[in-house]
Image (cartoon, helix red, strand yellow):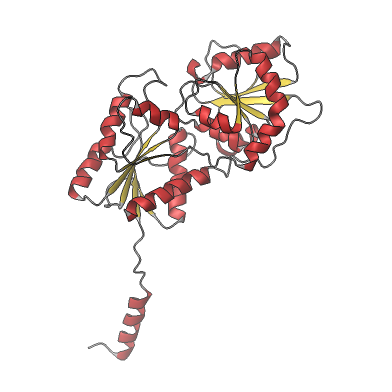
Amino acid sequence: MLSMQQLFFKMIKLFSQDFTKAPTVAINLLPREGSWGGANQWTTQLSRWLSYHGWMVYYDLSVIPDVVVVTHTGFSTENSFEAKEVATLKKKYPHVQCLHRINDNDIRKNSSGMDDFLAESNRVADHTVFVSKWLRDHHAARWFDLSRPHSVITPGADPRFFNPIGTALPAPGEPLRLVTHHWSDNWNKGFDVYQQIDELIAAEKIKDLELWVIGRWPQELKWKAARTFPSTTGAKLGALLRQCHGYVSASRYEPGAMHVAEGLQCGLPLLYHRDTGGTVEQGLRYGMQIGDDLGETLRYFSQQLPQLRAKLLADPPSGSKMALEYLQLLQRMLLG
């Protein structure tokens, strides 16, 4: 028989237990240190945000989660599990919800099979998130049924590193610094346009303008006037971007580019190409399209910079906003 003292401590232990059950999520992409592309930034921010708000975050299916989040990093996968494993899980545990994040297609890499792969993976999804309306419409024209539950959530960068604090408009007599940055050296990242800007500056056809290029570029491309920097990420990249005044992206058919989000969050209005896919949606809010006369576009962009910057700073994109949208969506999915 328990003594009164033992009974007292047993009751204290009993009533001090937390009877609330934290929601659990399994994400199939483990966050990594350094730069591993936009998907890594996404999973890093989402994991941190969900953990802060009381979720238990896993990166495998060793624990039966309340909800599974599936994304892809291409065919040579870095993922810890795929859709077929989710299908097996849901067959045994039908209550488990699945959110499928789609951030890719065939057209941007001139590949074949990605659209079909995504369509097959999407069979397990209870809700689908596209990173842009453009990408949603691309897949809807091929396989996705728009009557199914879905959302569009724009990518956002880590606000600890990518924020406008310390930026400013060009001072009197200071050139407008236009910047772009890419990890890929593929010409489709817009290097034809960046080369044209470089040549205009070198030939002094447009004055009071500098072009900064961060990262990698095609080996055969020889810059004439651009200031170049090696690849970097995080705080160092944010500090470089904040030294500039405008961002240019001519990358073709981007589903939802993280490099654009990083530039915008540093307070840099966007100069974009009409064929930049999902980037156009950001450009319509915070920038200007590159016209047929590149030199005239650059001059007009310089004139409009104060108004564009004011509009951007009034309602900037944010990784925190992105993560909050995912949190609210996951909550709705669990509530049915």
User: How many marks on residues?
Assistant: 0
Q: Specify whether residue 247 is in view.
A: yes
Q: Kindly give the residue lying farthest to the bottom in the view shown.
A: 4
Question: Image check: 128 left or right of 49?
Answer: left
Q: Kindly give the residue lying farthest to the left in the view shown.
A: 92
Indicate the position of residue 182 as horizontal and vertical percent values.
53, 25
Res 122 quadrant in image: top left
Question: Image check: 328 left or right of 65?
Answer: right
Indicate the position of residue 98 as horizontal and vertical percent values.
30, 44
Residue 265 drawn above or below residue 324: above
Residue appearing at x 71%, y 32% in the figure: 306
Question: Image check: 137 left or right of 209?
Answer: left
Res 44 quadrant in image: top left
Res 290 quadrant in image: top right
Indicate the position of residue 126 as horizontal and vertical percent values.
29, 43
Question: Image check: 3 left or right of 249?
Answer: left
Residue 218 drawn above or below residue 22: above
Residue appearing at x 40%, y 20% in the figure: 109
Residue appearing at x 57%, y 45% in the figure: 160
